[in-house]
Image (cartoon, coloured by chain):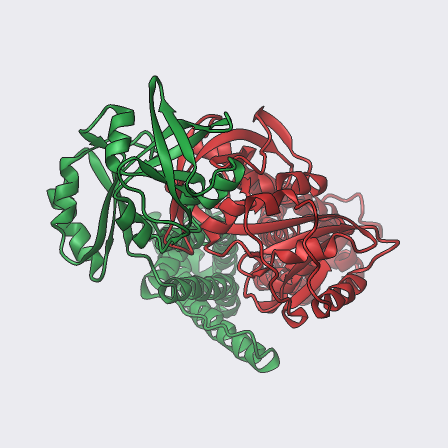
Amino acid sequence: MRLISFKYMQRQPLLILTLVLMIASVLFSITSFGFLGFYKTFNAYLGEEEDIIAIYETRSATPFTGVIPLQLTTRIENISGVIANSPEIIAPTLVRGKSVFFRGVIPEEFSKLNPLTMLEGETLQLRDTYATIVGKRLADSMGLRVGDGVLVLGVRIDRYLELDVKGIYESKSALDDEAIVPLYIGQWLRGTSYQTITVIRVKIDKGKLTPTQLYAAIADEAEASPPSRKTKPSPIEEIIPISNAAINPETIGVKETQEFMKTYLEKSGMTQETLLILSVVVFSFASATLFSASHTLIRQHEHEIAVLRSLGISTKTLRLNLIIKVLPWSIAASLVGVLIAEAALFAMESIGLQALFHTIHFQPDPLLIILNVLLVFAIVVLGIMHSSKKLNPK
Amino acid sequence: MLLRKSGTVESMLAIALIVAILASITSVVNHVNSQAETVRKLLNVGETFLVLSKNSTSITDSKVDTEVANLVKNVANTRYVLPQKVFTANLITTSDHSQTVLVRGVNTQDFLEARNAQNNGVSANGTQANVGEILSRLASVDKGDEINIAVGNRMVTLEVAGIIQTLTQSDTEIIVPMNVANHLTEDNSKLSLIEFAIKDDAQTEIDNLNERLPANVKILPTQQTQAFIQDLNTQTLSFLSLWSIAVYATVTAASYVVASRLTIESSYELTMLKALGVKPIFPFKLILSLTLVIALLGSVLGLAIGLSGAQIISTTTRWLLKNIQIAPVLEIQQIAQIILFTLAASILGSIFPALKAMRKTYAELPL
């Protein structure tokens, strides 16, 4: 006997099951998209391009707190395969009661790696001794305009300074939540000497140079005697005093920028896999409700099932038919759940939900959506299978 | 009697597992936040403070009466008190180079001492100035040079008494004695800020000073580690709060299922009660209170599962990965909050099935 076209299931219990499935789907989607959104945003902090390499201090506990010699910049600029290199110093601060990361850079070198679109005002110059340019999101959240003066208070160091907003930029990256200043201002705010920086980002020609080769070249440079004074100093050497500091290759790491950021997350046990497993565990814990809801659905149809069984429908056919009937509802519930979760996360993003003072970008992952649909359906099937003993007539 | 139904344990477990998710993640977040707090305590928090005018957002727009400096000087345990006037001016060097610079009028000797400045000359006095090292390089100014500083129509000629390096903004400033600053700004009655440092027990002194200061000024610590850590923790908790909405929505759904199941599985008892003539509200109260009991027991069980689960995972992680030390913990108010919110979500979820059970007539209920 064919049951496909026989509408014996009540609409209301089915809708209630769909609602429960949808809520579980929302929970899974918010957890997985949220955690992985944070993971991806953090990893993309210094750029996502594979040809950008980070030179950093391996002993530092966070990507923002390491110090390496600024002199490395001049020592690597002539290595074959190095296209551009940007020394950067990252400093946490407080401006108008809000925590803000300032990035000290050499604007000319920085723009070779991160071209910025100036929305208002002018671009930053290394000689702008009292100026900062501010990312669009930061400017919007703080109501900053070009020409505003801001008092910047230190976090790592007992220090303050005053800067004028010279421009507002957009980069479509984490930089939009930061402010950029000339390198030496970043050094004041970070509380280091003029000899040290946080990280050097190097754009390389991948055909000529790999991170391993770059590390080897740095180790060679460390052993070689410091270069004799050049006839024409670089723009930064004209402004701040840089001495020949010793380079210790054992404390220096060279990695692709994303790998560099991943290193720090992995130190705290946070990998893409562990976050995905955590999301699945969250779903599994919530699945007891789905299981119970499937069971309740069967109990709500006891009468109809008993009639069908007495008409000679086998348990196997009935079970299969129930699964087929629930399948479209389950898929719809999962997808609507994903959409609701996405809308909620988008709302969180637009109200400025941040991690480490950078806006988290939540992007739906097609694989996670498929996993969501499969998990929801699997639990429903298990619930129906488990309740199959109830399919026997009393 | 109804609690002895076969599905009760399953229902309790359904709610317990959802609460366990929340309890475990909250306990791990607490650990992360406590780590941040520990970092804050380890950092040497500064002892420097600024007195600025209340409505100012920057130093150059701040105006503080000079008399306020006397109030600050009366504070016990101060390491230094530096009344300062900061303003922009035009720097004109002998090579006819002109640029806008920040000028800081201050007691130069005390200021350079407070900044631990490296000075290749002496502290400026009279008609002298100290020039920051970066500014000296940019403007090609050296010790012994003469520079002209102009504000509007007023101009002074100063001799560079020394080039200074402080690793602060003063490396791009001109430091002049206060009388020069007053002459250039034509104002003896106002300062931009008063910078002072306290040796120990800063908070008590600041509280006392705050009571004596006029209402139009404010005190700011220059190192804001505490505010930064608080912001950091608030961000983590914001995501947790928003995420927990989804968790409580699941509790609501679970409670709906629990109440529906209870209604179906207790149809015999409910029919009997109605047949015996109980008031219509009674099944409503019964279903609601039973769901609440299940939710209460479930939440307590969930808290235990969540916390012990997080402890087991953190201990295992500590064995496997030596560098990861997690100590999950829940505060009492968080436990109370989780239980209360679970009960509230549970009431929300069970109202509809309970109402349905109340409205069903004797004839509709199957025996």
Question: Can you name the residue that lies furthest to the top here?
Answer: B153
Task: Estimate the x, y position of residue B26 in percent, counting from the top left.
Answer: 45, 62
Q: Image point 17% across, 29% down: which residue? A: B189
Name the residue nearer the viewer: A201 or A31: A201
Q: Image point 57% across, 82% down: which residue? A: B319
Name the residue nearer the viewer: B305 or A138: A138
Specify whether residue B228 is in view. yes
Q: Is residue B66 left or right of residue B90?
A: left
Q: How many marks?
A: 0
Specify whether residue B365 is in view. no
Compared with B300, B216 (above or below) is: above
Q: The green chain is which one?
A: B
Name the residue nearer the viewer: B17 or A48: A48
Q: Image point 77% across, 67% down: which residue? A: A216
Q: Is residue A310 left or right of residue A261?
A: right
Q: Quadrant of residue A362?
A: top right
Task: Estimate the x, y position of residue B99 in percent, counting from the top left.
Answer: 48, 27
Q: Image point 60% across, 30% down: which residue? A: A123
Question: Can you name the residue that lies furthest to the front here?
Answer: B144
Which hue is chain A drawn in?
A: red
Task: Estimate the x, y position of residue B79 in percent, counting from the top left.
Answer: 22, 56
Name the residue nearer the viewer: A348 or A259: A259
Question: Can you name the residue that lies furthest to the bottom here?
Answer: B319
In the rendered image, which quarter contains the N terminus of chain B?
Answer: bottom left
Task: Estimate the x, y position of residue B322 in percent, counting from the top left.
Answer: 57, 79
